[in-house]
Image: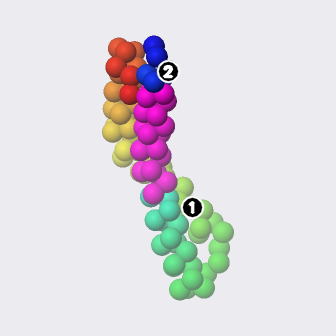
Amino acid sequence: MTVMGELAMAASALRLGLVLMVVPVGAIVLVGLFTSLFQAVTQLQDSSLAFLPKLVAAAVVLWLASPWMLTLLAQYTTRLWTGGGG
């Protein structure tokens, strides 16, 4: 394998990692934003109120998106093993 092929595989792996990371992190950020807004409006400053909704959102999003994420990972792994590269 050439250096350019290895760089293409590494770039593809980083791109895949970014795509897989955006979904749960985006959900956590949105839930955190709405939770902070709710706390500011109600002046309720409970630390569990800031943490628990984000944890539940991450679990639900990972549960719902896991088939799609596993499909992407399986396709990428198949391309690597068959020599398709990135």
Q: Which residue is mark 1?
A: 52
Q: Position of residue 66 (x, y in %)?
A: 39, 40
Amino acid at the residue labelled 1: Leu
Occupied quadrant, residue 69: top left
SS class of the residue under badge 1? Answer: helix
The answer to whether residue 56 is seen in the rendering is no
At a point 48% along the width and 28% down the height, the residue shown is 7
| Magenta span main SS | helix
Q: Position of residue 29 (x, y in %)?
A: 50, 62
What's the CA distance linking mark 2 and mark 1?
46 Å
The reply to whether the magenta stretch includes residue 17 is yes
Left or right, residue 39 beside residue 21 = right
Q: Is residue 85 above or below residue 19?
A: above
Residue 43 appears at what percent x and percent y? 60, 85
Q: Residue at x 35, y 14 (%)?
A: 82
Q: Nearer the viewer, residue 72 or 18?
A: 18
Amino acid residing under circle 2: Val
Q: Residue at x 57, y 83 (%)?
A: 40
5 w.r.t. 36: above or below = above
Residue 47 seen in the current view: yes
Circle nearer the N terminus (2, 1)? 2
Q: Which mark is residue 1?
A: none
For label 2, the crowd category at 10 Å Cα-Cα, with few meaning under 14, some 14 to 19 and many 20 or more, is few
Question: Is 18 one of the magenta-colored residues?
Answer: yes
Could you tell me which secondary element the residue under label 2 belongs to? helix
Between circles 2 and 1, the one closer to the viewer is: 2
Residue range of the region highlighted in magenta in the rendering: 7-26
Q: Nearer the viewer, residue 34 or 22?
A: 22
Q: Position of residue 64 (x, y in %)?
A: 36, 46
Q: Which residue is mark 2?
A: 3
Q: Residues within 10 Å of mark 1 (few under 14, many from 20)?
A: few
Q: Is residue 64 left or right of residue 30?
A: left
